[in-house]
Amino acid sequence: MQHTICHVRVTPIAFRDPPLLNAAGIHEPWALRSIIEIETNTAYVGINETYGDQAMLDLLAKAAPALQGLSPWALNEMEARVRALVQPAAGGSEFLGEQISLAPGTHVSKNVAKVISAFEVAMLDLQGQLAQAPVVDLLGGAVRDAVPFSAYLFFKYAQHIDKPYSPDPFGEGLNPTQMVAQARRMIDQYGFKSIKLKAGALPPEQEVDTLLALAKAFPGAPLRIDPNANWSVATSLKAVEQLRGVLEYYEDPAPGLEGMAAVAKACDVPLATNMVVTDFPEFARNVRMGCPVRIVLSDHHYWGGLRSTQQLSRLCQTFDMGLSMHSNSHLGISLIAMTHLAAAVPLLSYACDTHYPWQDEEIVQGGRLQFEGGSLRVPTGAGLGVRIDPEALKRLHDNWLNCGIRHRDDLGQMRKYDSSFTGKQPRY
Amino acid sequence: MQHTICHVRVTPIAFRDPPLLNAAGIHEPWALRSIIEIETNTAYVGINETYGDQAMLDLLAKAAPALQGLSPWALNEMEARVRALVQPAAGGSEFLGEQISLAPGTHVSKNVAKVISAFEVAMLDLQGQLAQAPVVDLLGGAVRDAVPFSAYLFFKYAQHIDKPYSPDPFGEGLNPTQMVAQARRMIDQYGFKSIKLKAGALPPEQEVDTLLALAKAFPGAPLRIDPNANWSVATSLKAVEQLRGVLEYYEDPAPGLEGMAAVAKACDVPLATNMVVTDFPEFARNVRMGCPVRIVLSDHHYWGGLRSTQQLSRLCQTFDMGLSMHSNSHLGISLIAMTHLAAAVPLLSYACDTHYPWQDEEIVQGGRLQFEGGSLRVPTGAGLGVRIDPEALKRLHDNWLNCGIRHRDDLGQMRKYDSSFTGKQPRY
């Protein structure tokens, strides 16, 4: 029986997101994603989750015809067709703005890679169902049974300015004591062993003090700080000196590859990034500069998919670089795709980032995914090993219909709190 | 039903090989390969073909336990186990000698990669049978229906010095007229569109004259010359000047990456190699030197398999390099694996090298594979799409038992013709 793709369904969804602070501003009350369902003539359905801003929805609509009549195995052909449909017009650039640096997935240069990724994972889910093998097996098989994630801390307000719903359980997080409590709560619930602090939001001294307090409260836990390029080179070097002996790696302290190179020259903590090495041409540029960035924070959603991220891993290995994993606000399909991928990539030995604890919704059957000791077990069922809960999909799509948000705007949201906020970087 | 590997069979074979001249000496009358059969508890058998020298047989025997109990999908686990078994002892180095530069597959540093490749292809053949998909689909699907190969010309004697069997139909090939006739014969039979001349065997002027004669006889055909690093930098530059406007690429004229870099600096024909970029560390070295080599001649047999060669393709793409394909003397299983791979790698747009026309035997059911217009159709059956002919396997194994050759020795063979031959490189 010949299996071919005959239908593609993209459903935008929205879910509650807490008032998390970052360099660009603050999270809005609703985070956007889209859910992809790819159906074959033989009634198999492959699923995936990706970005949900309007530009992405437009791109997906434009690219969906690429899948018509394709075999679920024809990933290379899908890529060629998507490239032909998406590349020339570079659709969606009108929605770009100050968000670029924070979320590489919104950059127009990633249009092809993120659409390919959106379709690839769903096609791999189909392949796994056809072959009766989990997606991790299609990637060469698991090198670990469970994938460790890190506690991803954010400075935050107790609730959104417009109070659209009852506040999240984490409460305010604006000083070291509150942040240690935030970490404690998250670690108690999920068992994470590593801690990442999203920084670049408060004055650097407060953020450094917070990290030092975390180091004291969680001795031996690998710690990371991510100012999202909101620090000057001088500030970056001063902070890393104060954090001597504390950091596992130093994520995107200063802006641009040149800024990172200046920091790298004067600091012996390895630099990590999801801002200046976000595609293969940027990878080459980093190598040609002598690899100031030593660790790439990969994200299959904009690196072109799971197989492409495996190729990135080979590039990192070839140039003696490390690999870890970046995340945006997401639900369980993205989380499970990350888990299959991380399980199949030997080099991915750092605990991966995830925003998952900040969400309280789920789209997959069975509800919220369960961590054990900070790790997620790699599914062994066919394909991704999770299915969509139709009622949840309807509920989250209704959220999208009602929330009024169509593209992420952390800066605009921040201006509701502070009309003088410019988002100019580096702020410190 | 759980499929696990329960048995591995390695059968050394030998087949007739004509007296082909190269930089290291001359081919012996018998070429060695080994045939791998990997069996599951569920009676599926995955097959492959690889090197057959004694060192490789020893390595395969040492590594075979790695496969016991593995799922055919567990390629990453297989790699880890092979690495653990093979790496430390670096077995087989005693058989190395002057052959290193000609055949990267015999270098001890490739032990892990070539064993992984030997097992990977057979496991992919199993996966394809389980998933009812051709191997090319497991690699992302075909980007071309047929893979073009090139006419691979050799200077040669009419027959072997020890006359072990009747001479091959190509006759002597020692001057331009004979070589044009060799090309004509091969192109008439196979339909190749590109021509590669193995050089480094006769004085450079004769080889240049031959290529100029080929250019005249086959106008418009892409031409390549491969002196196997047997020319000095000065000779390389003189020759490429005489060949102005004729070469598609210039393969391994001078020894070492430094020699290649010196040639690259003074010549505008892109340099290709299967001698100085033969693994990922060497790839990095070439990049750090500014990419004097522009085209990698890949060979999945020593690059760690089909998926690893796909990763090599991504590396080449990232650093604006090209990719073509190298070969050694081989039969149909290797040829079909190369075809699946080349079909799945968009970057592999050059016609691939193959020694296939120099062989007159086959190991696969149905006998010799058929080219159409110089290309081989990508199989659409499950797995590799070819099966072993048990009678052929027995016959070719008997050859191995009787031929007395246990490792390739082009130099020793050449000394039978010319006792003063040293093989010292570069000769010219």
Image (tube, coloured by chain):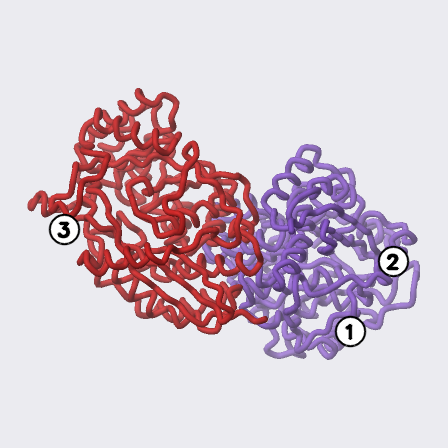
Chain colours: A purple, B red
Image position, residue B55 (x, y; %): 27, 62
Residue on which the image places disc 2 = A394
Q: Is mark 2 on a helix, strand or loop?
A: helix
Q: Residues within 10 Å of mark 3 (few under 14, many from 20)?
A: many
Image position, residue B249 (x, y; %): 37, 33
Assess whether mark 3 and mark 2 are in contact (beta carbons under 8 angstroms). Answer: no
Image position, residue B291 (x, y; %): 40, 41
- A393 displayed left or right of B249: right
Tell me if residue B215 comes above or below residue B306 in the rendering: above
The chain that hosts pointer 2 is: A
Mark 2 residue type: Lys
Question: Residue at point 16% right, 49% down?
Answer: B411
Q: Is mark 3 on a helix, strand or loop?
A: helix
Mark 1 residue type: Gln
Image position, residue B257 (x, y; %): 32, 44
Residue on which the image places disc 3 = B412
Tell me if residue B216 comes above or below residue A389 in the rendering: above
The chain that hosts pointer 3 is: B
Q: Residues within 10 Å of mark 2 (few under 14, many from 20)?
A: some
- B96 displayed left or right of A232: left
Select label 1 or label 3 by which is in front: 3
Foreground of the two, A219 or B223: B223
Q: In which quarter of the image is the N terminus of chain B?
A: bottom right
Q: Distance between the residues labelled 1 and 3?
A: 77 Å
Q: How far apart are marks 2 and 1 (CA)?
A: 36 Å
The tag on residue A178 is: 1
Q: Earlier in the sequence, mark 2 or mark 1?
A: 1
Assess whether mark 1 and mark 2 are in contact (beta carbons under 8 angstroms). Answer: no
